[in-house]
Amino acid sequence: MVQLDGCFKSEMMNGNGVHNGAKHEEFEDHAKVEVLTLPDLFCSLMSIPARQNPHYASVKADADAWIASVIKADAKWTSRNKRVDFTFLSSIWAPNCSAFALRTSSDWNSWAFLFDDQFDEGHLSNDLDAAVEEIARTREIMEGTAPRYSADSEHPIRYAFQTLCDRIKQSPEGFFKGKPSSERFQKRWKWAHELYWEGLIAQVRTNVEGRSYTRGPDEYLTMRRGSLGAYPALVLNEWCDGIDLPTEVAAHPSVFEIMVIISDQILLVNDILSYEKDLRLGVDHNMVRLLKAKGLSTQQAINEVGAMINDCYRRYYKALSELPCFGEEADRALLGFLDVERNHALGSLLWSYETGRYFKSKEDGSQVRRTRELRIPKELAVL
């Protein structure tokens, strides 16, 4: 049996990650259901109509086939992965990019969720030493000091990441060939992944210490905004759109603050929409569950998370107001960066509804969006 970077393939395929759909039920007895009212998740920055990349259909077929072949997936996993549809997510994130860039973004998503599942509910979730070791090996890939992995490697997740780094660098010896990225961008690419890995280590440390429900909301946000993986995804989308932020722009505090705000918005929205699935799968890194553990009812907790999301938009406009004018060329790059940030949040939101990620079907997701009602069985709602 092929190993997936330290854990057996069968464990990864059946874990509690994005490919493991929670069992949904039809509720005929309304007395057994708690109906929760959701905040308006499509207000403010999210009210703009989404655009989809025209290369979506052709890229999706190739991307789905590639990752299935890399991890030697069975038919069941392959079918689930097609429904998860990472290419849809990437196509909203980067509606204007080339097919090559869209494929790279989709493949990065496939890698990121497989990599992340090891730390969420997999073999690394409660093993701090092993988690640190896996990140060290992955860092070596980014730095160019790792051995070359192959498609037949015992470490397919590492192999997938190595092909992505090759594509980003556009190394002549890489999986694809092309124009090299600037040294400035490659430093930003590495920096964003370091933030992600720091968040994963903090998450595992919290698991080991058994402090999931003793954290306050601020500590939870600090950890989750790193472990979410939004920072490297945002920088990847800059690359997709050909944005190479000048140093003086990237270094401005408001630019990073906007990345923090978008990460917060995404994870808070995710914690509302994934609430039922997280209950069913026993996932405790969820703001709704954290607030309930501190005495709030489910509806009160959702209302509070909704208020936090709205505060993200106030924080965004405040950060925007504090940006100076850098000059024509730098400001053009900055405007592209702002488009990337908004599209990333919007794509993540739509993906949750459109692909059945958290609901039993796309139609069910559409109904939740239209009615803003989430129906939870009461035996789960008390958890």
Image (spheres, grey):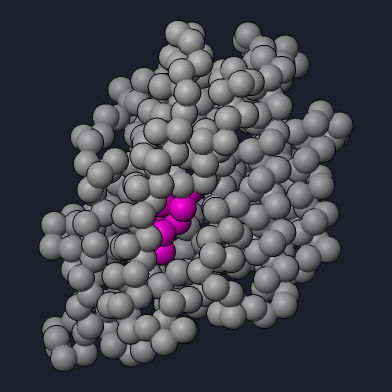
Decide: is 282 above or below 90.
below
Decide: is 263 above or below 96.
below
Decide: is 11 above or below 369.
below
Decide: is 239 above or below 131.
above
Image quadrant of residue 133?
bottom right
Image quadrant of residue 236?
top right
For residue 177: magenta? no
Which residue sits at x=82%, y=38%?
A: 140
Which residue sits at x=29%, y=41%?
A: 45
- Left or right: residue 71 versus residue 239 is right
Which residue sits at x=58%, y=75%?
A: 215
Which residue sits at x=41%, y=59%?
A: 268
> Front-most of 79 and 224?
224
* Residue 330 position within the rendered picture, expressed as x and y whole percent measured from the top left: 51, 14
State whether residue 9 appears in this view: no
* Residue 329 position within the rendered picture, expressed as x and y whole percent measured from the top left: 49, 9
Q: Main secondary structure of the magenta part?
A: helix
Q: Which residues are magenta?
A: 263-271
> Front-most of 3 and 331?
331
For residue 270: magenta? yes
